Image: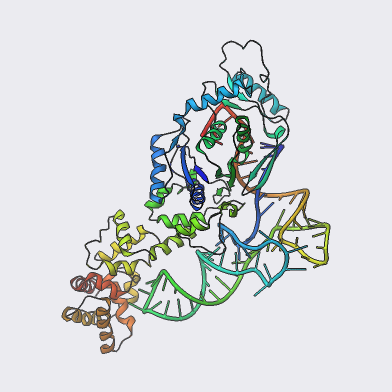
Amino acid sequence: MVVTRFAPSPTGYLHIGGLRTALFSYLWAKKNNGKFLLRIEDTDKARNSAEAAQAILDAFEWLGLEHDGEITYQSQRDEIYAKYIEQLLSEGKAYKCYMSKEELTELRETQMANKQRTMYDGRYRDFTGTPPEGVEPVIRIKAPQSGTIIVKDGVKGNVSFQAQDILDDFVIARADGAPTYNFVVAIDDHLMGVNEVIRGDDHLSNTPKQIVVYEALGFDIPSFYHVPMIHNHEGKKLSKRDGATDVMAYKEMGYLPQALLNFLVRLGWSHGDQEIFSMDEMKELFNPQDINKSASIYNTEKLDWLNSHYIKNSSNSDLAELLTDYDLILTSHDKKEIILDEMKDRAKTIKEMAELIKEILQTPTSYDEKAVKKAFKADSVAILNAFGAKVSTSKELHLPSDYHTLMEEVVNEMEIGFGKIGQPLRIALLGKLSGPGLDSVMAILGRDETLLRIANAITANS
RNA sequence: GGCCCCGUCGUCUAGCGGUUAGGAUCCAUGGUUUUCAUCCAUGUUACAGGAGUUCAAUUCUCCUCGGGGUCACCA
């Protein structure tokens, strides 16, 4: 069974890049009827917060990415890690290092001065003497000092590292006993049964260290898929400073979960020429083997396009529900179907849609000057009056087509072009020259409001 | 700097020795629309550079250049 995981450290909100790797992991597990697990890496007490952990969970909920099983919290697993440290110590695969921080710093400076790579020199590796006074030891693992370590990566291929280039006896437990990242990751993944690790490729160079731990403990090494970074416009790793990287900010901006997910799944992954993927299609088609090797630049143009696509294809009842987040309650509006039908093609986001609808529902308080100058001509008053008269006396006025008929009558009777009535009427109804179809607008507003707006415009502009 | 990864239109990408280098987005133009948006059509724009290998390289190899990542008692 395929078991994947997402393992964020709760130092802030859920990041767009993190979400993408989470999505990939989720899809791959679901495709294989496996499990997608969640582990909160909250061992850095200084930087972690419960709110951040909750924010991550909230984002997952919004997007409908459900994890399987219980959430694992690293902060609750100290005894487990301690047990494995003891084991390695007793097996002679790890040892106590009494080097002080000052000594370590000194060593590094010497190495840098000699243009050597900075690494621990193994001075306590085989130490059997009396430990120095006043130094709490760290625990270091005995890493191989030569040989090749190959990371078999489903995205990058086989990546080989020379032990002497990158390894030293790295710390697995700090002086206070707290285990370090590369150590606990390996243990947790093994204990959780994770066998397919999909994560950012910034972890690729950590992987040899984790392999050292896997091997020391006799654990099976999982499959790895190191997903390329998402870069900002400068071509650097996307970070919080780039703005709009908080997943939940997209909810506030009026993006739909399926649009965001669809956008993200296509960032670094593709399936031929297909652009639109439903969640079911993603689950069916996703394969981490098809992930790109190169980083992609984060650019939301396509997200906007996808979002408007999904808005257009949303049901009116779903849209009405989403609009309530922007203080637009349409449930009791008798023309809500017309409103939604008319507006779903016009908005890139739900937020924008709410604004557009509110704009129409509100009686204009001013008129765009340029528009008036351009389209409100000497004969406009007469035309609007003629139209107004028809509106006030017409019996059946409900549908856009009812209003359209009246407009046609005026055009025919007065022998004018459609623009002659359309333009000034548009100013009267909306205060400007752009916007939805006027017949729909009037059907939405109803007879009284339509007449009011016509009268207002004549008063204000003649 | 050491080590590792990457390099096709502005952007997301297809391509897996022989293609007029395809799609999407963006942009522009035209059509539809009383207007705007939608929609439809059309168009501009790409294989980082140089050596090989081969009858043939975007595709395979090497070098150069460029970009990124990583080198903690952070995760």
Q: Is residue B45 above or below residue A236?
A: below
Residue A396 location (% of width, % of height): 19, 79
Which residue lies at the image location 25% right of the left edge and 73% below the top edge?
Answer: A442
Q: Is residue A365 visible?
A: no
Q: Colour mode?
A: rainbow
Left or right: B55 as drawn, with respect to A388: right
Q: Quadrant of the C terminus of chain A?
A: bottom left
- Asked if residue A355 is positioned above or below residue A425 in the image, the reply reads above
Q: Quadrant of residue A370?
A: bottom left
Residue A135 occupies which quadrant of the picture?
top right
Q: Position of residue A10 (x, y in %)?
A: 45, 37
Q: Nearer the viewer, residue A459 or A319?
A: A319
Answer left or right for A328 relative to A62: left
The answer to which of A229 and A408 lies nearer the viewer is A229
Residue B72, placed above or below residue B55: above
- The residue lying toward the viewer, choosing from A114 and A92, is A92
Q: Position of residue A283 (x, y in %)?
A: 49, 55
Q: Residue at x 65, y 21 (%)?
A: A106
Q: Along the horizontal axis of the image, is A454 left or right of B40? A: left
Judge by depth and name the residue closer to the eye, A345 or A198. Answer: A198
Q: Is residue A387 visible?
A: yes
- Report the label total: 0
Q: Seen from this angle, which residue lies furthest front?
A: A1
Percent coordinates x, y for residue A162 in the rendering? 71, 36
Residue drawn at point x = 39 percent, y = 42 percent: A55
